[in-house]
Image (cartoon, rainbow, N blue to C red):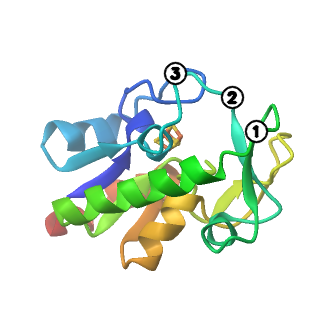
Amino acid sequence: MYVVSACLLGISTRYDGGCFCHEKLMKLAEEGKVIPVCPEQLGGCPTPRDPCEIAGGDGGDVLDGRCAVISWTGADMTEKFIKGAYETLKIAKACGAKKAILKARSPSCGAGRIYDGTFSGKTIPGNGVAAELLIRNGIEVYSEETAADILEGDPLRPEI
Ligand code: SF4
């Protein structure tokens, strides 16, 4: 069973009310092997909402209280992002999911790289808040970009 970012599955959870349709992940969902989650909605953020980025750090810094998640308009969204990360972890644990495929570069879901906090499209190394919490709890986290290769080669599927 995979935890997957809801916005990759045609579910309109993105900040702008939109979504993506990742063909292979949607097929996996049809097979009943996916739990869709949106950490930002789970944390109480509305949809649509102002875009947010982590200011001056990564998801680990947010979880450890060293920096904040700030919206485009300057609102401090840290508490909601942390709550959403813990709710996502609860869902992963409840389902016994050991792997997650999350939206690349998101301040919640990004795995390996995230937007740099300047709302300029630039990225830095690091994980989003929810991705980091899942990793800290022993869950393997991929992005849809790294998972595309994984699903192509199919090495994970027998383990689901
Ligand atoms: Fe929700 Fe993550 Fe998609 Fe953002 S990237 S809309 S937090 S599922």
Circle 2 Cα neighbour tier, 10 Å, few/some/many (<14 / 14–19 / ≥20): some
> Going from the N terminus, do you reach mark 1 or mark 3 first?
3
Circle 1 Cα neighbour tier, 10 Å, few/some/many (<14 / 14–19 / ≥20): few
- Determine which residue is flagged by label 1: 75
Q: Nearer the viewer, mark 1 or mark 2?
A: 1
Residue in the image at 41% along x and 43% along y: 42
In the image, taking residue 134 as reference, residue 94 lies left or right, namely left
**Vertical position of residue 61 compared to residue 105: above or below:** below
In this orientation, which residue lies closer to the viewer: 79 or 61? Answer: 79
Residue 154 seen in the current view: no
Q: CA distance from mark 1 to mark 2?
A: 9 Å
Indicate the secondary structure of the residue bearing disc 1: loop
Image quarter where the N terminus lies is: bottom left
Q: CA distance from mark 3 to mark 2?
A: 13 Å
- Determine which residue is flagged by label 2: 50
Residue in the image at 70% along x and 65% along y: 58
Residue 125 seen in the current view: yes
- Determine which residue is flagged by label 3: 18
Indicate yes or no: mark 2 CB to ligand 1 under 8 Å: no
Indicate the secondary structure of the residue bearing disc 2: loop
Label 1–label 2 contact, CB within 8 A: yes
Residue in the image at 53% along x and 20% along y: 17
- Residue 72's spot in the image, x, y percent? 79, 34
